[in-house]
Image (tube, grey):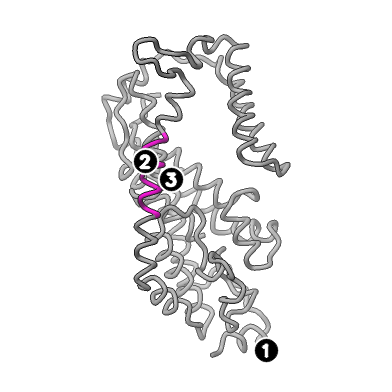
Amino acid sequence: MGANPDVLIGAILAGATFGDSISPISDTTIASAGTQGADIGGVVRSRLKYVVPAGLLAMLASAALDATRSSAAGAVAAAIPVSARGLPMLVVPALVIGLLVAQRHLIEGLLLGILATVVLGLALGLIAPSAIVHVDRASFGAKGLIVDGMGRGVGASVFTILLVGLVATLQATGALDRLVHWATRPGTTARGTEAWIVAAVSERCCSRPTASSPCLPWVRWPGAAARRPASVPTGAPTCST
Amino acid sequence: MTVCTWPFLLPYCLPTILASSASASGAPYGLPRVSPFAAGINNTYSWALLLAVLVAVATGFGRREAPSNTAQDRLSP
């Protein structure tokens, strides 16, 4: 395609973020609706007026960014032969999403997704049987596409575990509790309350980066309902803001 | 909506790290791995959404006030 790799990955991430912010099956939408007693459809509709303009602006910005950056790597990518033979593989993520919508367990959905990928890939001749998984005689270890794929997630997994340990240490000092207590004081105006919510969620996002859907503190911890300040109305803007 | 901004922008959050990890699959074709920082800084949607949130808070765009004798009373300390 000849796109700049940085801009291309940024645009892909932007698309994923757009879906996460508006999809009725995303964790942020479900958490917003569930914790505030709102219906999911209402949360999605309330977000449209913000999300759609932001999405259009992002499309224009990504196109402008790519137009202003030349890339040798992009020229290399443009020279790679492409084929439409892999398009049927899009059935697999659709299958996994369908299973999750049908409230099947995540592990079950992912395992079935791997199985469907292997079956479909073999049927279409996109992958060779020996490439899936095999025993390497030299190292006497498992090798193959699945093992390699899992290996790419090891770094992020170790990083996450260490980060959670760091956050737990911070929590033990009580610093986060004091910050949360300060951040959850009630506002006196709608604008002030919204500003506090944005600041509190931003703080949670930055200090607990492993959480994919941090909401206001009282809805994330065990015994959340009991910790929710009575002065904050159920209908007040919270996570969806 | 704020939750769809920072985790997708900061280089030490999972979305940007996973995006960087995904770019490693281009190595066999001579493509460079994109850093989490570059992935986040080029995530134009999260920047735009952050701008939308700040504008909405500042201007009240899209805000629906509850009846004065309920929400305002409950918001008061």
The x and y percentages for residue B37 are: 31, 45
Residue located beneath label 2 in the image = A64
* Numbered badge on residue B69: 1
Q: Say which residue appears at 61% left-offset and 86% top-offset.
A: B74
Residue A42: give x, y in percent of width and height.
69, 61
As for residue A35 lying within the magenta part, the answer is: no
Highlighted range, magenta: A153-164
Which of discs 3 and 2 lies nearer the camera? The answer is: 3
What element does badge 3 sit on? helix
Task: Please identify the residue farthest to the right as the structure is shown.
Answer: A102
**Residue type at the position of mark 3:** Pro
Against A66, is A34 above or below?
Answer: below
Give the amino acid type for the residue marked by disc 1 in the picture.
Asn
Q: Does A212 appear above or below A126?
A: below
Viewer-side label of 3, 1: 3
Across and down, in percent, residue B15 comes to 43, 45
Q: Nearer the viewer, residue A148 or B36?
A: A148
Residue B15: which numbered mark, if any? 3
